Image (tube, grey):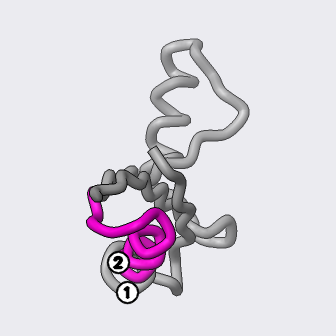
């Protein structure tokens, strides 16, 4: 059975988010200011197996392939 998971990958809080800053400045220039903007990625994975097996595979994919642990964090959610 196939399971679908979403992986949200975000820069760590201590890392300067240049994309987020650029969006923040553009919003400010257009008088649409937001308190804070952070830009990350969202990856949708479809993995075979039971929910527990598929979640474990999705976590391994996120941990070892999709994110850089030095500068990013990730969260997994069942879709």
Question: Dominant secondary structure of the magenta stretch?
Answer: helix
Quarter of the image holding residue 47? bottom left
Name the element at disc 1: helix
Residue 13, given in percent of the width and then of the height, sits at 67, 65
In this rendered view, identify the residue nearer to me: 76 or 27.
76
Q: What residue sits right under mark 2 in the picture? A: 61
Question: Can residue 73 be seen here?
Answer: yes
In this rendered view, identify the residue nearer to me: 77 or 65.
77
Above or below residue 45? Residue 64 is below
For image coordinates 43% across by 50% down, the residue present is: 19
For image coordinates 52% across by 78% down, the residue present is: 71
Q: What residue sits right under mark 1 in the picture? A: 64
For the N terminus, the quadrant is bottom left
Residue 4, given in percent of the width and then of the height, sits at 36, 52
Q: State the extent of the magenta-drawn residues as a range.
A: 46-61
For image coordinates 32% across by 52% down, the residue present is: 44
Q: Magenta stretch containing residue 31, yes or no?
A: no
Residue 50, given in percent of the width and then of the height, sits at 41, 66
Name the element at disc 2: helix
């Amino acid at each position: 059975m196939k399971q679908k998971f979403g992986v949200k990958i975000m820069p760590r809080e201590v890392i300067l988010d240049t994309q987020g800053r650029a969006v923040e400045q553009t919003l400010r220039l257009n008088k649409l200011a937001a308190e804070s903007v952070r830009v990350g990625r969202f990856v949708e994975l479809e993995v075979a197996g039971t929910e527990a097996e598929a979640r474990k595979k999705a976590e391994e994919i996120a941990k070892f392939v999709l994110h850089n642990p030095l500068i990013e964090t990730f969260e997994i959610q069942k879709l």
